[in-house]
Structures are given as structure tokens and as C-alpha cells.
Image: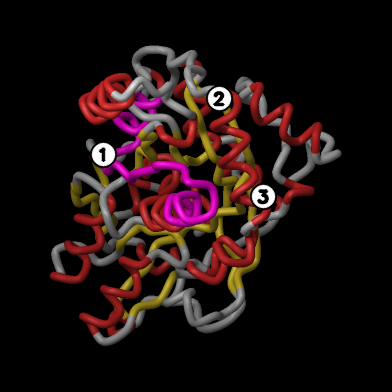
Amino acid sequence: MTLLKTLAAAALLATGLAPAVQAQVQSFSTPPQGSVWNTMASVISGQARKSAGMRLVVQPYGGNAQMMQAVNEALAEFSLNDVNDVITAVQGSGDYNAAMPNLRIVARINPFPVGLYVKESSGLTSVADLEGRSVPSGWDAFPIARSHISAILAAGGIGWDDVDQVPVPELIRGSDDMASGRVDSAFFAVGGPKVAEVDASVGGVRFLGITANDETLAEIREVRPAFYFSEVTPAPVRVGVDEPMMFVTWDNVLVAGAHVPDEQVQSLLAVLFDEREAIGAAYPPLNALNLETAFKEFPGVDYHPGAVAFFAGRGVEMTSDQ
């Protein structure tokens, strides 16, 4: 991306033109193709190119640490992530060995329910049924999954010591290993394109149920304080959800680097909320975009000043509730 930006700037300077914000190449750092964030970024970028003339491209990375590092070091402009992971990245805690102080929140995008899913033919229906069965572990290239699965297991009344841990490197590989029979379960977000792909290849999949009550809520918040429960109802895009189910959930956020000009942030936010209907039609989970709940306070992280100005201009005040 740095080379692309250099070439683009050189071409503009050669013609005596100043590089306008819309003319600059900007990138979205995401996980590999097939992941939910990659799909979301592709839809948002496509709409930004169409309606605002922004030259946004999607750049896949191996996992969250690489995604956040790219934004922190000005190798990418935007990313999508679990707010819990952004908080730990800024602090340099958890799976991050060094603080990343240049990460800024731009907006709360949507609630993000995640779960463990299995082949329909397995006969398993709840997370508790995984006791003595295999669960993907390790996640060296996608460490965020460790805390997510820890919370899901806790919400099912079991822990890592109760299951057979099978190392997998990252998200897509984890689902492929479940499809091939190497591991009994796989981790993914509800609505992920990869879940639909596996569903078609193995003759059906289902997400496993959890127990959502005050006791398990306290347990998942010991893993990450921003986790909560939400109910998900069946829909064509929610493969593996055949009835209303409760899921461990967190807030998905749009992230920008401190180096990104305010005008770029404001342009992208305008696309998100002014073109919400088109974006939601392209990827239904993004129908959850809501201007009134997008400016939410999170502990330990700052909003980009361009986002603060955007929400002020739209008359939206910061909220602190779920």
C-alpha cells in the first residue's frame, strides 16, 4: 500500500495537481477473504468508491494483530474489529506485547454475535455437549478467538479443560478443519460467508446453544468486560440458526489511524449512514447501522477527531449504554 500511495502521489505531482482527499488510495486492513470483516469492508469500500469517489481498497492480513499494527503504523487507514481487541491493542495488554497508541474509534457499527458451530449430522445441540469433544485452540494467527471461545465455553458451563483442544492457526482454516473432520466444532460470527460455504459442503451446520443468565454473564465479563448476550433470530443470511438463540456478543467498531485526515473519516462516515440502505442490501448484517447508537463511549480508547466532528454536526450525542 505504501508503494501504491507513493506512485499515486508522484503521478499527481507530475501533472501539477495537489492530491485531493478523494484521490488518495486508502486501505482497509481485514482478515482473509471469507471472513465477516473482509466482507463488510468490501461492501463499505465499494459503496465509498461509488458514492464518494474514495479510492478505498481492502488489504487482507493474517489476523487481528497484523490488522491493528497496519493501522497503528500508518500502513492502512481503516479497519474493523471487536472493541475489546482495540482496547487491549491500545493498552498493549492481552495478546499485544506493545501498546498501539495511534488507534482511534470511528463508530460503533453493529452488535456482533459469535458462536461455535458443528455439522448438523454430529447430533450436538449445545456448547455443553462439547464436553470430551474437540474444539479449535491455539489461534496463533488470530489470537482474538481465544478470548471469544473462552467466553462461549463459559456460557455453556464448561471450560478448556473439559474439551479436547486441537490447534488451528486462524479463522478460515478452523472452519476448513471442521468441514474435513479434523475437529468437531468451529468458531465464527453469525452470518459469516464461510459458515454458508461449509454448510453447503457438509450437508448442513448448526450453531450450538448457550445458557444466558446472570451467572454466565458475570463469567463472560471476566474474560472481556464488553461482552454481553443478544438474541439472534433465523434469517437466510444467518446460516446455522434455525430458531431464536442467545449468543455471546460484542460491539463491532470501525477503527482509523491517528494519521488519517479528518476529512477522510467524515467522508467515510457520511457514506456509512447516508447510504445505509444500499450497504445493508449488499450485506444484510449491516442493516444494523444506526446513527443514533454509533457514537458510544468505550473505556480506554479515544474517538478520532473527525468522527467527533461528524457526530456533532449530525446532532448525535455520545451514549454509554449497551
Sequence-first disc among 1 and 3: 1
- Mark 1 lies on a secondary structure that is loop
Q: Is residue 33 left or right of residue 280?
A: left
For badge 1, the amino acid type reads: Tyr
Query: Mark 2 — residue?
Result: 104
| Front residue (pair 202, 23) | 23
Q: Is residue 37 left or right of residue 58?
A: right
Q: Which mark is residue 215?
A: 3
How far is the residue under mark 1 from the one under mark 3?
Answer: 37 Å
Q: Residue at x 24, y 30 (%)?
A: 4
165 drawn magenta: no
Query: Mark 1 — residue?
Result: 61
| Label 1 Cα neighbours within 10 Å, binned few <14 / some 14-19 / many ≥20 | some
Q: Nearer the viewer, mark 1 or mark 3?
A: 1
| Label 3 Cα neighbours within 10 Å, binned few <14 / some 14-19 / many ≥20 | few
Q: Is residue 72 above or below residue 249?
A: above
For badge 2, the amino acid type reads: Arg
For badge 3, the amino acid type reads: Glu
53 drawn magenta: yes
Q: Residue at x 28, y 74 (%)?
A: 197
Q: What residue range appears in magenta?
A: 44-71
